[in-house]
């Protein structure tokens, strides 16, 4: 029988690789004063085994580490894949596919949270009042004849990006 020296951890903190550095001993250490440091300290007060694993460009290595540690739960603090915030859902999807329990919303929720217009439409369809809004495609002008109901006065016009990156 193989000798598996890796002990199962209680909590695995999955963080963005940009939030710290791996030290000489091979342990990932988050930058001082970051939210990751505060979360780690809080989790260590409650759990014996808390391991921080960076999610970086070497995705197979990260997945191998997750399998080795067999965490009881993954505390998912990631916000992007390779500095692309629109890909955060992919990490949750990988955790789902690997059958890990994790904190935070799933892939569909993360995608919806990035789509402001889609979120408003979903909430409105559930009968909740939302502010009037309309979506403009890049390079298109606001024409009063096309947006008559949206531009009735008094109205403040707030412009936001459709997708947050």
Image: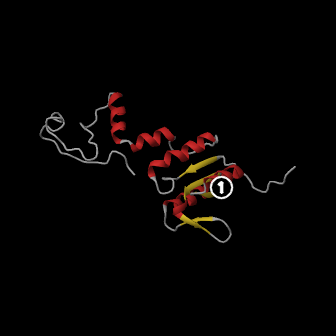
Q: Nearer the viewer, residue 149 or 142?
A: 142
Q: Residue 73's x, y, as percent?
A: 62, 46
Q: Quadrant of residue 153?
A: top left
Q: Nearer the viewer, residue 122 or 97?
A: 97
Furthest residue in direction front, as rendered: 139
Identify the residue at image location x=51%, y=56%. 82
Furthest residue in direction right, as rendered: 1
Identify the residue at image location x=84%, y=54%. 3
Q: Quadrant of residue 6?
A: bottom right
Left or right: 128 as drawn, with respect to 83: left
Total number of numbered discs in the rendering: 1
- From the image, tell me which residue sits under label 1: 61
In this rendering, the answer to whether 130 lies above or below 45 is above
Q: Quadrant of residue 120?
A: top left
Mark 1: which secondary structure? helix
In this rendering, the answer to whether 18 lies above or below 47 is below
Q: Residues within 10 Å of mark 1 (few under 14, many from 20)?
A: few
Identify the residue at image location x=49%, y=63%. 34
Left or right: 24 as drawn, with respect to 56: right
Q: Residue 119's x, y, as percent?
A: 37, 37
Identify the residue at image location x=61%, y=58%. 52
In this rendering, the answer to whether 39 lies above or below 71 is below
Left or right: 79 as drawn, with respect to 49: left
Left or right: 163 as drawn, with respect to 14: left
Q: Residue 132's x, y, as percent?
A: 23, 36
């Amino acid at each position: 029988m193989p000798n598996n020296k890796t002990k199962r951890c209680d909590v695995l903190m999955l963080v963005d690789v940009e939030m710290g550095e791996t030290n000489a001993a091979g342990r990932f250490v988050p930058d001082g004063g970051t939210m990751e440091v505060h979360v780690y300290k809080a989790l260590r007060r409650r759990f014996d085994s808390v391991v921080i694993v960076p999610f970086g460009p070497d995705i197979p290595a990260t997945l191998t580490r997750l399998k080795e540690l067999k965490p009881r739960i993954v505390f998912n603090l990631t916000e992007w894949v390779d500095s692309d915030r629109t890909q955060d859902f992919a990490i949750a999807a990988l955790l789902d596919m690997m059958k890990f329990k994790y904190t935070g919303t799933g892939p569909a929720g993360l995608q919806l949270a990035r789509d402001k217009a889609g979120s408003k439409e979903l909430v409105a369809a559930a009968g909740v009042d939302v502010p009037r809004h309309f979506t403009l495609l890049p390079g298109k002008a606001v024409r009063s004849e096309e947006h008559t109901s949206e531009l009735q006065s008094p109205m403040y016009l707030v412009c936001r990006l459709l997708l947050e990156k």
